[in-house]
Image: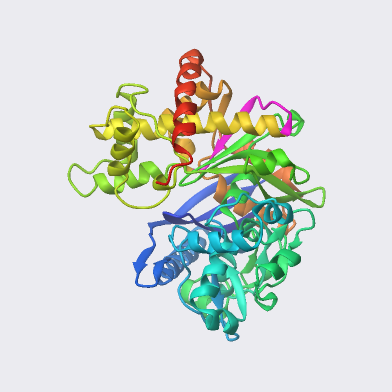
């Protein structure tokens, strides 16, 4: 019988899941108990997360975990929540929500970005935080909240990022977990503390920012009421995993101890995050010019690692295409859309995925068609052609980002570890190998849940360190390896992609 069991509540920007991980020696097994879809809701005040639905579905997951524990005879020792980055809630002294959290895709955040970068030079914001300048970042969201409703911000007692919020709702003390806080552009990655001088200039009220804690920190126990309701044991502990889903996924990269970090990671999902794990931040002029970010990760040798990466739009474009396609029959799943894409003509239409039009929600096929017309390319006509345009363009964006990453760091990466739900897309994996000329090692697809669970286990002293986490993942999940082929064709197409990027990047979408 397994010696330990931990529960991960893993919330992505499109779906959530409750997964139990059982540890038997050096083997981890995952048991998915509940999965659900969710989406932000457009309201008069902006685009908000549906907290009520998310909370209800978390409770469904906890109840499923309680039943699994009774049926299996295995006690779940702890739980932890990870989510997407940057978004937050403001809460009162009594812990009540001060309004619904805004979604990072809310167009209002652009106004906060413009306002703050006019008062504080972007170079100084980067020098203080090492974070890629994007309007979605929490510091710009806060600026916009302060502009629209200064009284609410002044009356708020605490800012809680989404994992922090759900942990407190489950029964923990209020804290700010370090990896999720580092996505906010409010933390100094060199010290692991709030970037106080910048926050003073940005007029962020200091009283709303709490204690920063490392992944694997014990922060309390499940409340008696929720334990009774779910059937989980009284006293079920709550540990902070790496609260940012990407940080949990990177912790579960199945890299060998002796590979001298000749690998980079591609966390593939709604967003694609391509980067390298470092021992210290890289905040050079080249890093700033390349708009790379220094987010913090699970500690190694007592210090937080650094996820030096760039955010790329990811499979969001395919998800939005599917959402539009689903408005009329036939309804096709992602596997079938990928099959149709694989059968479509290669390199017919390329997209500059960095453009804002491809990040915002709504009628993605229409946006792709408009872009193709504007740039003198064939307009996709079938579902397969639309999806192929997205996937090929993503692979080319990965190639471009990898080239920049290697130039900034002055080193070559021989292997790309693709983890997360997008690593199940075999067509994209092969395109990535072909476009970059690097071996792609795909899996585990549930790296985020695996990392969440094993960081909890590390906090409970069942797993000694990050290296042991990675050894266990490598022992537990068989990867699929994609070898580069037809790289010469991709070299030629990359030139066309770069020309499109130069042509369009500075235009207003």
Left or right: 442 with respect to 316?
right
Between 188 and 275, the one lying in front of the other is 188
Q: Does the stretch in magenta take in 417?
A: yes
Between 507 and 79, the one lying in front of the other is 507
Quadrant position of residue 417: top right
Picture colour scheme = rainbow
Is any part of residue 386 visible from this angle? no
Vertically, is 176 above or below 13?
below
Left or right: 87 with respect to 283?
left
Between 93 and 82, the one lying in front of the other is 93
Q: Looking at the picture, how far across and down is residue 464, in whole percent?
A: 76, 50
Residue name at image x 75 percent, y 42 percent: 284
Between 348 and 14, the one lying in front of the other is 348
Q: Does the stretch in magenta take in 161?
A: no
Is any part of residue 228 visible from this angle? yes
Q: Looking at the picture, how far across and down is residue 338, in whole percent?
A: 34, 32
Residue name at image x 34 percent, y 39 percent: 334
Residue found farthest to the left: 329
The stretch in magenta equals 409-420
Vertically, is 101 above or below 333?
below
Residue name at image x 72 percent, y 41 percent: 285
In this figure, what is the number of numbered marks?
Answer: 0
Quadrant position of residue 214: bottom right
Q: Looking at the picture, how far across and down is residue 42, in whole percent?
A: 35, 66
Q: Looking at the picture, how far across and down is residue 413, in whole percent?
A: 67, 27
Vertically, is 298 above or below 167?
above
């Amino acid at each position: 019988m397994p010696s330990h069991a931990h529960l991960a509540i893993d919330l992505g920007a499109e779906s959530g899941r409750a997964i139990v991980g059982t540890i038997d020696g050096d083997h981890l097994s995952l048991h998915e108990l509940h999965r659900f879809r969710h989406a932000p809701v457009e309201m008069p005040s902006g685009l908000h997360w549906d907290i009520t639905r998310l909370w209800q579905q978390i409770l469904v997951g906890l109840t499923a975990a309680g039943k699994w524990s009774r049926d299996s005879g295995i006690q779940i020792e702890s739980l932890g929540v990870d989510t997407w980055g940057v978004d937050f809630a403001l809460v009162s002294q009594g812990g009540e929500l001060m309004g619904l959290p805004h979604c990072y895709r809310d167009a209002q955040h652009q106004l906060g970005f413009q306002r703050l970068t006019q008062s504080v030079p972007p170079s100084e914001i980067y020098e203080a935080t090492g974070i890629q300048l994007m309007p979605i970042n929490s510091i710009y969201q806060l600026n916009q909240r302060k502009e629209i409703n200064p009284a609410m911000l002044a009356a708020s007692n605490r800012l809680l990022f989404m994992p922090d919020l759900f942990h407190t709702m489950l029964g923990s003390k209020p804290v700010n977990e370090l990896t999720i806080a580092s996505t906010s552009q409010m933390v100094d990655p060199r010290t692991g503390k709030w970037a106080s001088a910048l926050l003073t200039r940005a007029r962020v009220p200091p009283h709303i920012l709490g204690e920063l804690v490392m992944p694997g920190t014990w922060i309390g126990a499940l409340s008696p009421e929720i334990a009774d309701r779910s059937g989980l044991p009284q006293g079920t502990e709550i540990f902070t995993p790496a609260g940012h889903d990407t940080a949990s996924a990177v912790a579960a990269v199945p890299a060998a101890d002796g590979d001298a970090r000749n690998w980079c990671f591609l966390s593939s999902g709604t967003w694609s995050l391509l980067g390298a794990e470092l021992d210290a931040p890289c905040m050079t002029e080249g890093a700033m010019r390349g708009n790379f970010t220094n987010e913090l990760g699970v500690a190694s040798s007592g210090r937080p690692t650094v996820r030096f990466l760039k955010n790329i739009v990811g499979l969001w474009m395919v998800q939005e295409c599917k959402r539009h396609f689903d408005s009329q029959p036939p309804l096709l799943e992602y596997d079938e859309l990928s099959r149709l894409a694989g059968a479509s003509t290669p390199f017919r239409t390329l997209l500059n995925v960095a453009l804002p039009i491809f990040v915002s929600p709504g009628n993605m096929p229409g946006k792709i068609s408009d872009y193709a017309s504007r740039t003198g390319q064939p307009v996709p006509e079938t579902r397969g052609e639309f999806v192929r345009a997205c996937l090929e363009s993503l692979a080319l964006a990965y190639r471009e980002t990898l080239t920049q990453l290697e130039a900034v760091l002055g080193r070559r990466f021989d292997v790309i570890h693709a983890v997360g739900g997008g690593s199940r897309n075999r067509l994209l994996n092969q395109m990535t190998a072909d476009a970059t000329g690097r071996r792609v090692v795909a899996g585990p697809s549930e790296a985020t849940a695996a990392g969440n669970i094993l960081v909890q286990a590390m906090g409970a002293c069942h797993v000694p360190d990050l290296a042991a986490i990675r050894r266990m993942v490598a022992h537990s999940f068989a990867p699929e390896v994609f070898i580069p082929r037809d790289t010469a064709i991709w070299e030629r197409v990359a030139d066309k992609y770069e020309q499109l990027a130069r042509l369009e990047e500075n235009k207003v979408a």
